[in-house]
């Protein structure tokens, strides 16, 4: 999978390096997921399921593992009122 905004790495090493950098700021706790750290692939997977990726939730919201739009909006509300 790919997206229109990312430039595909030329080598596997570049892909690994990008993954390591992406994982540094990712709040998603699904470390066993093969898309973890590959943001374009992760977003495409969740979009296809009608979900919001865990990285867009707060740490508290992500731990609920509910990737629905409704859960995301509730998470945003909690952050705004905190």
Image (cartoon, grey):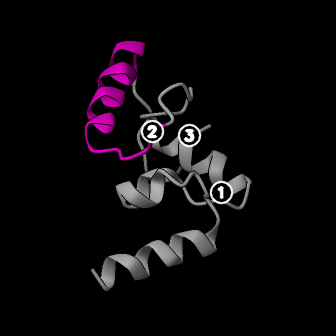
Residue 27 belongs to magenta span: yes
Q: Quadrant of the N terminus?
A: top right
Q: Quadrant of the C terminus?
A: bottom left
Residue 28 belongs to magenta span: yes
Give the magenta part as a residue range. 10-29
Which residue is at a point 42% across and 76% down the rendered structure image?
Answer: 76
Q: Callout 3 environment at 10 Å: few (<14), some (14 to 19), or many (20+)?
A: some
Say which element carries label 2.
loop
| Residue 64 horizontal side relative to residue 60, left or right | right
**Mark 3 or 2 closer to N-term?**
2
Q: Callout 1 environment at 10 Å: few (<14), some (14 to 19), or many (20+)?
A: few
**Mark 3 or 1 closer to N-term?**
3
Cα distance between the residues tagged 1 and 2: 18 Å
Predominant secondary structure in magenta?
helix
Quickly name the residue at label 2. 29
| Residue sitting nearer the eye, 7 or 71 | 71
């Amino acid at each position: 999978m790919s997206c229109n905004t990312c430039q595909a790495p030329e080598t596997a090493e570049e892909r690994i390096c990008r993954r390591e950098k992406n994982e540094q700021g990712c709040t998603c706790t699904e470390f066993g997921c093969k898309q973890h750290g590959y943001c374009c692939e992760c977003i495409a997977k969740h979009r296809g399921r009608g979900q919001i990726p865990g990285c867009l939730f707060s740490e508290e919201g992500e731990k609920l593992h509910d990737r629905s739009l409704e859960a995301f909006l509730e998470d945003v509300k909690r952050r705004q009122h905190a």
